[in-house]
């Protein structure tokens, strides 16, 4: 059973930074095709933040381009770990952030970590 586990959320002032981490356990012998971060604010639908492939190609939502950076571990024991460096945080970035790991169309989701940005 694959279970991504997020960490690193918290409360930060506008303009500040946070780094989220996600490690997918139960993945011996496989490398996820794509891992990524999604977020859901109260009353809104879950939306894509950023994704990264096993080859290192990254994709970002327009709202976070230039502020957020997604990366992935490249050692044998960290290939299924994904990070999200968030700089220049804005109050509108406040949401629960979810880690996603996709393996040939099979998606696994983490429980989410709260990010709150105060103005």
Image (spheres, helix red, strand yellow):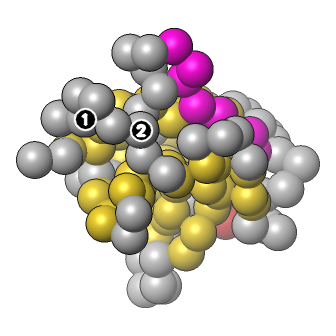
Residue beneath disc 1: 27
What separation in Å lies between label 1 and label 2 (alpha carbons)? Answer: 7 Å
Question: CB under 8 Å between callouts 1 and 2?
Answer: yes
Q: Is residue 70 magenta?
A: yes
**Is residue 38 in view?**
yes
Q: Is residue 38 magenta?
A: no
Predominant secondary structure in magenta? strand
Q: Position of residue 62 (x, y in %)?
A: 82, 69
| Label 1: how many Cα within 10 Å (few below 14, some 14–19, many 20+) | some
Q: Position of residue 105 (x, y in %)?
A: 38, 70
**76 over 27 or under it: above or below:** above
- Name the mark on residue 31: 2
Question: Residue 55 appears in which quarter of the rendering?
Answer: top right
Give SS at disc 1: loop
Identify which residue is drawn at 89% across, 48% down.
Answer: 66
| Label 2: how many Cα within 10 Å (few below 14, some 14–19, many 20+) | some
- Name the mark on residue 82: none
| 58 on left or right of 52 | right
Q: Which residues are magenta?
A: 68-75
């Amino acid at each position: 059973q694959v279970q991504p586990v997020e960490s690193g959320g918290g409360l930060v002032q506008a303009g500040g930074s946070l780094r989220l981490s996600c490690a997918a356990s139960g993945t011996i012998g496989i490398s996820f095709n794509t891992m990524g971060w999604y977020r859901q604010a109260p009353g809104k639908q879950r939306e894509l933040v950023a994704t990264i492939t096993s080859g290192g190609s990254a994709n970002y939502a327009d709202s976070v381009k230039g502020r957020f950076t997604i990366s992935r571990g490249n050692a044998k024991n960290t290939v299924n770990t994904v990070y999200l460096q968030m700089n220049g945080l804005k109050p509108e970035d406040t949401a629960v952030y979810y880690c996603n790991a996709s393996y040939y169309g099979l998606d696994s989701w983490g429980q989410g970590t709260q990010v709150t940005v105060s103005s």
